[in-house]
């Protein structure tokens, strides 16, 4: 017997598109993905709340943000394989001209074998979607991981460059066990800091048990270049992480 989990769709984007359109768009993208660092979509169901829900395998380790909170698990040697898994998963998506659009620790699940698998493609975007699938992917995105160019436009879209920015924020999140800009309590304050060009402060070595070393912090800073063109591609990041 395989344990499963079900993602029910919230009707928060109806002003822009129907929830069924959004769900079909996500299913269209997700159903074509096959990679060891992407959680497989097992199917869909309408047995919950009379809406279309997506079914995936249950992941024993929960999501990555929760995983690193467990101090019984020493994240020193363990968080690095997960970050490599995330980099490989994002590189795979980008090789298919897909931007994830909502990269963050809660959207990465940890298997029983402690492998990281990317999930939740509700904000994903095809580079050249067919007309029937051209929907707004900006609903429900997470501001603390959001690239500045997505905040500076009235119709933000998911891009690979924005995924790279979010990857840097996810690195910081998993090493520090805290959300980006955790010291800023309200979301509008986070938006203000990002738009004004303020980057997260580097955590102290003691707070990360000396895990966030200079080479990782350099990757973060490169991911947070305000000019999207200046950010490294995921294949470059993956090659550096694999060393």
Image: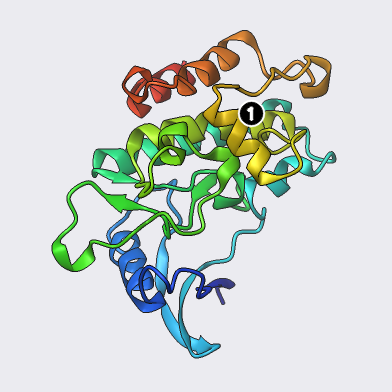
The relative height of residue 98 versus residue 214 in the rendered view (above or below) is below
Pick whichever, 111 or 219, lies toward us. 219
Residue 80 drawn at (x, y percent): 60, 28
Residue 60 drawn at (x, y percent): 66, 58
Query: What secondary structure is marked by label 1?
Result: helix
Image quadrant assignment for residue 134: bottom left
Give the residue displayed 71% in from the left and 19% down from the top. Answer: 211
Give the residue displayed 50% in from the left and 35% down from the top. Answer: 166
Residue 34 drawn at (x, y percent): 32, 54
Q: How many marks?
A: 1
The relative height of residue 92 versus residue 58 in the rendered view (above or below) is above
Task: Look at mark 1 in the image and give the residue it sits on.
Answer: 172
Q: Dot 1, crowdedness within 10 Å: few (<14), some or many (≥20)?
A: many
Give the residue displayed 32% in from the left and 74% down from the top. Answer: 21
Pick whichever, 193 or 97, lies toward us. 193
Give the residue displayed 67% in from the left and 18% down from the top. Answer: 212
Image quadrant assignment for residue 233: top left
């Amino acid at each position: 017997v395989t344990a499963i989990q079900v993602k029910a769709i919230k009707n928060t984007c109806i002003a822009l598109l129907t929830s069924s359109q959004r769900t079909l768009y996500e299913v269209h993208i997700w159903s074509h993905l096959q990679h060891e660092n992407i959680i497989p979509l097992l199917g869909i169901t309408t047995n919950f709340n009379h809406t279309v829900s997506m079914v995936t395998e249950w992941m024993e380790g929960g999501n990555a943000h929760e995983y690193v909170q467990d101090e019984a698990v020493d994240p020193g040697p363990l968080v690095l394989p997960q970050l490599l898994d995330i980099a490989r998963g994002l590189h795979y998506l980008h090789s298919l001209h897909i931007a994830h659009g909502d990269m963050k620790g809660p959207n990465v699940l940890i298997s029983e074998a402690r492998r990281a698998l990317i999930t939740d493609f509700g904000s994903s975007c095809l580079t050249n979607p067919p007309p029937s699938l051209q929907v707004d992917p900006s609903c429900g995105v997470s501001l603390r991981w959001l690239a500045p160019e997505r905040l500076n436009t009235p119709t933000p879209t998911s891009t690979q460059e924005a995924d790279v920015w979010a990857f840097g924020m996810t690195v910081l999140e998993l090493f520090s066990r805290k959300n980006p800009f955790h010291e800023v309590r309200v979301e509008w304050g986070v938006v203000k800091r990002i738009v004004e060009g303020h980057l997260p402060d580097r955590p102290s070595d003691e707070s990360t048990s000396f895990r966030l070393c200079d080479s990782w912090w350099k990757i973060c800073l490169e991911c947070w270049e305000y000019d999207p063109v200046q950010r490294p591609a995921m294949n470059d990041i993956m090659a550096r992480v694999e060393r």
